[in-house]
Image: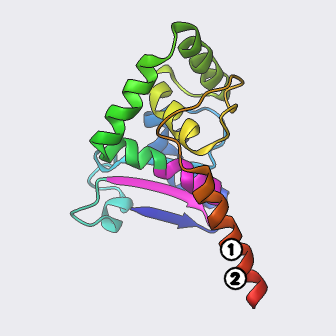
Amino acid sequence: MILEFASREEMNTALDALSIHTDGLTRARSGHNFPVEAVAAEHWLRGECSPETRYVIAYRKGDVSTLRHERAHARFAMDSAYRTQVLACWHSLTSQQQAHISAFLQRLGYSQEACIDEFQAYAATEKSNFFGIRLEVDFAEDARELAARQVGLKLSRRKR
Ligand SMILES: [Zn+2]
């Protein structure tokens, strides 16, 4: 389920308490992601979920890069083939590369437990030098596809 908020403040007021347990992030969040089981039965958010809802992500309206990042978390949680691919990639890295990436993510404020999940979310959606080292991962979103989507947006804006 995707929750769209009008402002970051409104979103974080509503969801910070839930997210603190999943990623341990200590700075202000631009998005949220957690499994439905993390939501207490009496929480208002349970009323928004359908019986099929397994995972919740949230972002501020218009913040497309955060939406892509949070979507990668949902995919990692729900798509076991994708998870297998990510874990194989992580284990193919050298221990120096792994240590560099986890230190990088810890500097951003993430807990050690969130490391592989955040690694895949950033590696799938950001530039290949995001972590300060060049990294080509086989699960990254197709750059050409993304460029085509941006061109599409530009064209439709021009038409109006
Ligand atoms: Zn994340």
The location of residue 136, given as percent across then percent down, is 58, 31
The location of residue 140, given as percent across then percent down, is 52, 42
73 or 159, which lies in front?
A: 159
Question: Is residue 74 visible in the rendered structure shown here?
Answer: yes
- Note whether ligand 1 is within 8 Å of mark 2: no
What mark, if any, has residue 156 been given in the picture? 2
Instruction: Tell me, yes or no, whether the two marked residues, 2 and 1, touch with CB atoms within 8 Å.
Output: yes
Quick check: 56 above or below 103?
Answer: below
**Residue at the outermost bottom position:** 160
Local SS, label 1: helix
What mark, if any, has residue 107 been given in the picture? none
**Residue at the outermost right position:** 158
The quarter in which the C terminus is drawn is bottom right
* Side of 137 where 89 appears, left or right: left
Picture quadrant of residue 34: top left
Of the residues shown, which amino acid type is indicated by label 2? Ser
- Note whether ligand 1 is within 8 Å of mark 1: no
The quarter in which the N terminus is drawn is bottom left
Q: Residues within 10 Å of mark 2 (few under 14, many from 20)?
A: few
Local SS, label 2: helix
The residue at which mark 1 appears reads as 153
Of the residues shown, which amino acid type is indicated by label 1? Leu
Query: Would residue 3 be counted in the magenta stretch?
Result: no
The residues colored magenta run: 55-71
Query: Would residue 62 be counted in the magenta stretch?
Result: yes
79 or 93, which lies in front?
A: 93
